[in-house]
Amino acid sequence: MTEVGEVVRTKGDMAVVRLKRNSACSRCGACGLGAGPDDMFLTLPNTLKAKPGDLVELSLESGQLLKASAITYVIPLIALIVGVVMGYMLGERIGIDRQLAGAILGIVFTAAAFGAIRALDPLFRRSNHFVPRMVSILSNNINDADL
């Protein structure tokens, strides 16, 4: 997956890039980086030494995108299913309504999965495993072109 963004600012070897939110994002808010309804900001390694105002091409490998999607959506779904099944089975044993026990345990397992993902988020960020990388500078800062 490739996107084009504008470098907003740099600090050391990192750059903050503004991207227009595309239809694939669908304003889900999962990244939590949205500045407005149509913009999101990413902080990523400035491997190309881009300057503020530069348009850069970003790339994220399809495999990494699929892994991130699996972590975000599939793991909580599996937790929900496991919780419902376990609650359904345990409800009968402990003498409460099976459907109610399944619903409660399904919600608890799903919340626990989201909590675990959120707790592991700093680890994912530090690894830069799911962070797009700069591929090329498409256009230079207008101020640099005037010099």
Image: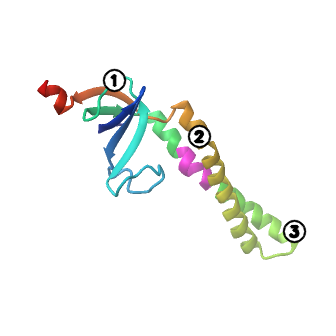
Q: Quadrant of residue 109?
A: bottom right
Q: Is residue 81 above or below residue 53?
A: below
Name the foreground residue: 58 vs 143.
Answer: 143
**The C terminus lies in quadrant:** top left
For the residue marked with disc 1, what is the amino acid? Answer: Lys
Q: Which residue is mark 1?
A: 49
Residue at disc 2, secondary structure: helix
Q: Is residue 147 above or below residue 105?
A: above
Magenta span includes 104: no
On the question of residue 61 being in view, the answer is no
Q: What's the CA distance linking mark 1 and mark 2? A: 25 Å
Residue 128: percent from left, percent from top: 51, 31
Residue displayed at 70% across by 62% down: 108
Q: Quadrant of residue 88?
A: bottom right
Give the label on residue 122, or none. 2
Marks 3 and 2, the one that precedes in the sequence: 3
Residue 21: percent from left, percent from top: 33, 50
Q: Which residue is mark 3?
A: 93
**The N terminus lies in quadrant:** top left
For the residue marked with disc 3, what is the amino acid? Answer: Arg
Residue displayed at 36% across by 28% down: 134
Magenta span includes 71: yes
| The magenta segment | 70-77
